[in-house]
Image (cartoon, rainbow, N blue to C red):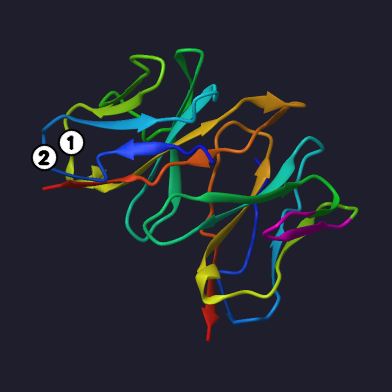
Amino acid sequence: LAKTTQPISMDSYEGQEVNITCSHNNIATNDYITWYQQFPSQGPRFIIQGYKTKVTNEVASLFIPADRKSSTLSLPRVSLSDTAVYYCLVGPDDKIIFGKGTRLHILP
Amino acid sequence: EPEVTQTPSHQVTQMGQEVILRCVPISNHLYFYWYRQILGQKVEFLVSFYNNEISEKSEIFDDQFSVERPDGSNFTLKIRSTKLEDSAMYFCASAHGKRGGRQETQYFGPGTRLLVL
């Protein structure tokens, strides 16, 4: 499984765009990049998944450069309710191996 | 939107007792999982289940743990003789299947908070 590295924590303000970058230098050809969000005392929730270039949905965008050794989750115009832990995951695998994630704290 | 449900939301038990945690996965999903999260720590994979058998299990999933899909809707995790260190939030997840060689999105339930005294 490819190891991922992401910042332990980030702070931002309401209304700002937040970009969380994840490094995955050993990503394999058949690996996908997936981001999950977890609020306190809740289960993780799928946000977005991509293989290359850019993916956008109603919640976020995911930017993946050509070498796929990193990816950036972009949350447009965050609100207080976006305060959560964000996990970057890489692999095609059945099981999800969660890291510590990035604890995003949105300030008013 | 369909969702994974889990019961009970909270369970308190004495050390050495058996507990059964219940999950109802999304109805057309074929892959089922249990994870746990000890307070303040990472979410940890326990076991995956497909076609009525365990596909993969972690080192945490020892002989004290078992899973079952007793009917077409429920998916259960049994801990035979609970230990203090089993206190955690237990999450069930399900996925529809595989597409193009990759696992489809896993949908997580709200969790059962287990406290072993």
Lateral position of residue A37 relative to residue B19, left or right: right
Kindly identify which chain the residue marked by label 2 belongs to. Answer: B
- Crowd rating for badge 2 (residues with CA inside 10 Å; few <14, some 14–19, many 20+): some
Outermost residue to the bottom: A108
In this rendering, the answer to whether B34 lies above or below A8 is: above
> Residue B44's spot in the image, x, y percent?
44, 44
For label 1, the residue is: B82
Q: Amino acid at mark 1?
A: Thr
- Crowd rating for badge 1 (residues with CA inside 10 Å; few <14, some 14–19, many 20+): many
For the residues marked 2 and 1, what is the alpha-carbon distance in whole angstroms? 5 Å
Q: Quadrant of residue B96?
A: top right
Kindly identify which chain the residue marked by label 1 belongs to. Answer: B
Q: Which quadrant does the N terminus of chain A fall into?
A: top right
Residue at left 41%, top 54%?
Answer: A42
Report the span colored magenta. Answer: A56-65
Q: Is residue A49 magenta?
A: no
Lateral position of residue A54 relative to residue B79, left or right: right
Lateral position of residue B59 relative to residue A103, left or right: left
Q: Which of the marked residues, 2 or 1, is nearer the chain's N terminus?
A: 2
> Residue A76's spot in the image, x, y percent?
71, 71
Provide the secondary structure element on which disc 2 rests: loop
Q: Amino acid at mark 2?
A: Met
Which of the labelled discs sits on residue B15, or is there none?
Answer: 2
